Amino acid sequence: MFTIKPIGIVHIDVADNDIRNRGSAQGKVEIYEEYAEGLHSLEGFSHIILVTYLHHIKEPERRILKVKFRHLQSLGIPLETLPEVGVFCSDSPHRPNPIGVSIIHVLKIDGRIIYADNLDLFDGTPVIDIKPYTPFRRIESLNVPEWYAKIIALVKKEP
Amino acid sequence: MFTIKPIGIVHIDVADNDIRNRGSAQGKVEIYEEYAEGLHSLEGFSHIILVTYLHHIKEPERRILKVKFRHLQSLGIPLETLPEVGVFCSDSPHRPNPIGVSIIHVLKIDGRIIYADNLDLFDGTPVIDIKPYTPFRRIESLNVPEWYAKIIALVKKEP
């Protein structure tokens, strides 16, 4: 067992149950005073990797190992057509260690506040690390399994 | 404070102090029996994101907030020419929460063992999460600060 500590917190002015607006919300990442020096020279990276602790996840949800991409139901895709896959093929927050890895677009940095958009996180989510998104994180040639390619195709078909 | 638990372990047949060979080593990621079901359907992703706990990091190293890209000295780049930047601009293992986010190339998956190359991790590193590297993780249009672009240029100039 390892212990990790929050270095900051996500602020989003969208209610937890407002799924429609949460994904596209603008918000702020506040880095605590104690860690603010670590932000030095970060300005200029258009994207950063935000590592978070998904604090709403309860202990039983950490035992889930098979998932469906349930959020696609909101696009009109029936649950029964979605495959059940291992949790490590997904970004489901229900996973043994509820850690989020989000690539976020930085709008501006003002002191120890990072303004960002498309923050698909809950208000109050603890931030545990930040890393730069460099060209080396961009994999040019990649493959995905057939079941995943089918899901992408379904999503693209929706209006 | 949050607690996270290992779901697996990295096996690499390279000594900890063998810096030259560690970055390019082939190795294995073993997922523990208890979590093996979470790997279902992962086969076919050419790349995965491996989230690790950098277990060699000691408490004082978690207080470091400014870093230099010291490993570039091995390419003949003098330390004094490297800028000192905030730790969140870097992948330095010395950081408040020693969490690694590595994009790795999967060679094959055999049961609960993932064979991969370019595992720039120590033998015995605990694995805490796996996520798929999907096309959505590939940011086409991105910017980096001028100081970072200069470092990339220096690296590319080296033979």
Image (cartoon, coloured by chain):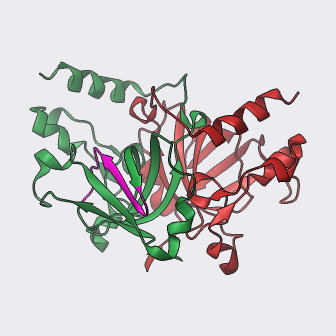
Chain colours: A red, B green
Identified at 26% across, 54% down, the residue is B27
Left or right of B104? Residue A157 is right
Residue A136, located in which quarter of the rendered image? top left
Q: Which residues are magenta?
A: B110-122
Q: Decide if residue B5 is in sight here.
A: no
Identified at 21% across, 48% down, the residue is B25
Identified at 82% across, 27% down, the residue is A157
Left or right of B77? Residue B6 is right
Query: How many discs mark residues in the rendered view?
Result: 0
Q: Quadrant of the C terminus of chain A?
A: top right
Q: Decide if residue B72 is in sight here.
A: yes
Residue A15, located in which quarter of the rendered image? bottom right
Left or right of A114? Residue B129 is left
Identified at 55% across, 29% down, the residue is B139
Q: Quadrant of the N terminus of chain A?
A: bottom left
**With respect to residue B90, does B111 lie above or below?**
below
The image position of residue B85, as x and y in percent, is 34, 42
Residue B125, located in which quarter of the rendered image? bottom left
The image position of residue A20, as x and y in percent, is 87, 46
